[in-house]
Amino acid sequence: MERTLSIIKPDGVKKGLIGEIIKRFEQEGFKIAAMKMIWMNKKQAEGFYAVHKDKPFYNSLTDFMSSGPVVVMVLEGDNVIKRNREIMGATDPKKAADGTIRKMYADNVEQNIVHGSDAPETAKFEISYFFNSLEIVD
Ligand code: IDP
Ligand code: MG
């Protein structure tokens, strides 16, 4: 059983897509092991995306991620990291496959509705960034 961190980004929340996205995860058979809504400040968004601190889009990305509430979730399931990335689609919605969340709902490469961890080590860091062990259902 694997775990991944999912975020419904501020654009997903503003567009009223929380229910749609959670439904998609449940249909896929992912177990929701933790969930909450938060509003990150700039510093918290910078900490989460520290891996991208040298990228040209870092400042704009962290402004966006702190622009409104997000829903953070721990998803659990077999191969959930890869399967979640498949459901999300490519980072740039123009390049995302039909039927993926980003293809269906995202406006552009930055405002792309969802985040998903990309590897076991990043999942571990990202889950611990938002949740302590008492907040995750076993
Ligand atoms: P991912 O979310 O598909 O894993 P990453 O490369 O890890 O994509 O980038 C993190 C986030 O940074 C993306 O989801 C997107 O919001 C933003 N981003 C990535 N590339 C660009 C870009 O070229 N311009 C603006 N924002 C970008
Ligand atoms: Mg990434």
Image: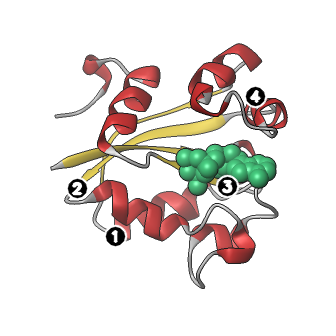
Asked if the residue at tag 1 contacts the one at tag 2, i.e. Cβ–Cβ closer than 8 Å, the answer is: yes
Find disc 1 in the rendering and name its residue.
Answer: 28
User: Are dots 2 and 3 in contact, CB under 8 Å?
Assistant: no
Which residue is rendered at x = 39% and y = 30% of the image?
127
Which residue was labeled with disc 4?
Answer: 66
* Sequence-first tag of 3 and 1: 1
Q: Amino acid at mark 3?
A: Ile
Badge 3 element: loop
Packing grade of label 3 (10 A; few <14, some 14-19, many >=20) is many
Which amino acid type is marked by label 4?
Answer: Ser
Report the Cα–Cα distance between label 2 and label 1: 10 Å
Looking at the image, residue 14 lies above or below residue 52: below
Q: Secondary structure at mark 2?
A: strand
Mark 2 lies on residue: 77
Amino acid under disc 2: Gly
Mark 4 or 3, nearer chain start = 4
Q: Is residue 126 above or below residue 31?
A: above
> Label 2 vs label 3: CA separation?
22 Å
- Looking at the image, residue 46 sits to the left or right of residue 125; the answer is right
Q: Position of residue 26 (x, y in %)?
A: 36, 63
Mark carried by residue 59: none
Lower sequence index among marks 2 and 4: 4
Earlier sequence position, callout 4 versus callout 1: 1
Establish if 30 lies above or below 34.
below
Give the labeled residue for mark 3.
113
Q: Tell which of 32 and 87 is nearer to you.
A: 87
The residue located at (30%, 57%) in the rendering is: 80
Mark 4 to mark 1 CA distance (whole Å): 29 Å
Q: CA distance from mark 2 to mark 4?
A: 29 Å
